[in-house]
Structure formats: structure tokens, C-alpha cells
Amino acid sequence: MGLEDSLVDKFREANLKDESTLAPRALDPTDPTFVLDPEFRRKVKHDEFLDCLDDQIPVIDLTPLGTNDEEALGNVIAKVRSAVEEWGFFQVVNHGVPLELIDRLEKEAVAFFSLPLEEKKKVCRTFDLPTGYNNAELTKNHRDWKEVFDLIVRGSIVLPDESNTTHVHVFNQWPQNRPALREAAEAYAKSAEQLAFRILGLLSRSLGLPAEYFHKYFEYHASRLRLNYYPVCAVPDLALGVSRHKDASALTILVQDEVGGLQVRRKGGEWIAVKPRREAFVINVGAVFQVWSNDRWKSIEHQVVVNENRARLSFPLFFNPCPSVDVEPAPEILSESNPARYYPINWGLFMRKRYDGNFKQYGEDIQIEHFAVNRVSPYQHL
Ligand SMILES: O=C(O)CCC(=O)C(=O)O
Ligand SMILES: [Fe+2]
């Protein structure tokens, strides 16, 4: 038996013995794909926070957004620009989303994830319907130590089918007899959606464009709210809650509980553990802004580590354009010395391929880089 086989055994046996997790066992620790190759395992624990402020994602107070104070607003925009250029991430406080909406959703999410697996599987995601419950998600072909519940923020969207010959209607699945989960998720999603539009405006201005510049791409936006539940893991140095990845969204708004687990890759390659703050949202720009900004901004790698003591909840809202939109570098940003670095990418087809890649085991997930000019891409026809 090789070294890796013995680690797979260790992972399985320790997790089978572990009775501490709140939810009934929904992850099968005998699946060897949970055990990551050494280079992908955590380097830093979930609560190993660095004390120095320079080592934390900048915190930006959004109070000036509701005022006519142009000078204060100008400061906010400058801070956003600098944080996105430096980190790809920032945190916001005084964001306008009521805390009680978050509390309520956390309570309902815990109640849902605590249900027996057979109950949760009644709203299981399928190949054609990428909403609802999933306990077998792959991030770049690694199995994640997490359970998720996904919903479309606007209730439903229309996506191209796999072969791009027709369209499929994607709608939300809700557990029967649990109206409180739906009410809590919809109320939170509505409030976070408003925040997303305000942040979209800030990001546009940070690129030197009018506040409403990108709003036209979001009329029938395809945003998704995800409820993440990371059970206790008996051997957290072998698996991750979410393997390293870059978000494909325009921007992501994340709220997390006090446990900790999110880690962001810095330019030097090191991983920084993000210290949870109850009053703050973590925001990052995704691949769509990378394209719009013609690589001035990058979608930055991040991951989630798990731990042996406490389960964790987090709720990312992936703010996505309409499926019909072709995402391409904003012409106002381009010049002779800054030519377009990407071909136009149809967002609906891109999402379809991403969903399919999460569901099936592909060699490589589709990435925005596949559309870079000068790259020979299997997806250039999209
Ligand atoms: O749980 C988190 O803190 C982040 C999750 C995440 O990055 C994702 O779902 O894309
Ligand atoms: Fe992410």
C-alpha cells in the first residue's frame, strides 16, 4: 500500500468514527477523491489569522453611499479600486442588509442541513436542474467537504441546453413543508441583490466609468445564492471545504458565520485566513470583471479549509449578468496600447459549461482564460 492509500484509509476511518458533526452524515468519507494531493492541502488553519492590519482584506465603510457627500464617496471609490487591485477582495460594513435577515437564514439553513439525507435528496440537483441540494460537488475535479443548497435569485432563468440547440428553464427547488427556508432565503437574496447593484456601481466608477455603466447587463440577471454547510472534518489537513478556485461571477457577496475557513491567495502565493466579522460582507470581483476591465482586475484564487471542531456556514451570492449577454472588454477601456485580451463570451453558454463541469468529471473546468486572445481554445466557438 502506498503512502497515499494509507492516507485515504486514515481519512475514512477517522471520519467514520467521528460523531461530533451536527448534521447526519451526508458526506461519504470512503470516497478517496476527498483526499487532496499534498500541494493542494491547507497550509494555514481555519483560525490562524494574522494580526497586522496590512495582512487583512481592507474594510470599507459604505455609509457615504446613501448621502450626497461626493468627497466621501470619492474616498470610497478610491479605496475600492486600491483593494481590488491589491487583493481582488474587500470587505464592506454599513452595507444596508439587515442583520436579522442573515440570522434568520442561518437558522433555517442549519435546520435544513440537519435533516436526514433522504429528505435533503428530495430537492437534489440534477444535470438539467442545477438548483437545490448537492453533497457531491467537485471544484476542479476535487471532491469538496461540504453540502450546498443553491437558488436562483430572480426565481428562474433560461439557459442554453448542453448542445446549444434549445433552451432550458432553470427554476428553484424548495423542500416541501418548510416554507420558512424559502421565505428566509428569498428575503435575504432580495436585500443582498440591492447591495450587489450598489457595489456594481462602485466598481464601475472605480474603473472610471459611469455608475450605471454595467447595469444594462443585469436586467434579467442570472445570479445565484448558495448556502454552504461545511461539516466537521476529522482530518482537516487532508481535505478542503472548497478547493482553490476563482469565481466566474461579476462579483460575489459573501456572508459567513464566526467559525472561519475562507482563505485568499496573495500575489506572493501565500494563503491568508480571512477573519470573520459579523457586521461585514466579503466582496470579490470574478471573471466577468476580469474581462470587462481587460485584465486590469483579476479574479483571485481562494479556498475554504475545514476543521475538526465546528461546522461552518457561509452564503455567497454570485452576481451574474443575463445569460444572453456577451461579456467582452469595455470599449472605453481599450486603446491601441491596450487592445482587447478576450474574445466575447456568451454568458449563458459559459454558465451551462460550468454547471456541466461541476456535475460531470471533466479534465479541466471551463475558465475565462480559455477565451483569451492568442490562446488556442476548445471553446472559442461559444
Ligand atoms: O465559504 C466560503 O467562505 C467561500 C465559498 C466560495 O468561495 C464559493 O462557494 O465559491
Ligand atoms: Fe468562491
Image: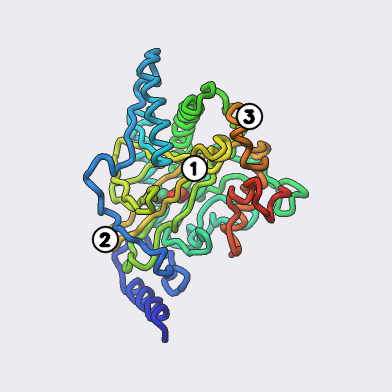
> Does any portion of residue 194 appear in the rendered image?
no
- The percent coordinates of residue 206 (x first, y second) are 46, 27
Badge 2 marks a residue whose secondary structure is: loop
Q: Nearer the viewer, residue 336 or 74?
A: 336
Q: CA distance from mark 3 to mark 2?
A: 50 Å
Res 331 label? 3
User: How crowded is the residue under tag 1: few (<14 C-alpha within 10 Å), some, or many (20+)?
Assistant: many
Instruction: Tell me the quarter of the picture where residue 58 sits.
Output: top left
Does the residue tagged 1 have its C-beta within 8 Å of any atom of ligand 2?
Answer: no
Badge 3 marks a residue whose secondary structure is: helix
Say if 9 sits above or below 240 in the image. Answer: below
Report the quarter where the N terminus lies. bottom left
Q: Nearer the viewer, residue 295 or 348?
A: 295
Res 309 label? 2
Q: Residue furthest top?
A: 68
| Amino acid at circle 3 | Pro
Mark positioned earlier in the residue sequence (3 or 2): 2
Which residue is at 33% across, 28% downward? 61
Residue of label 1: 298
Mark positioned earlier in the residue sequence (2 or 1): 1
Mark positioned earlier in the residue sequence (3 or 1): 1
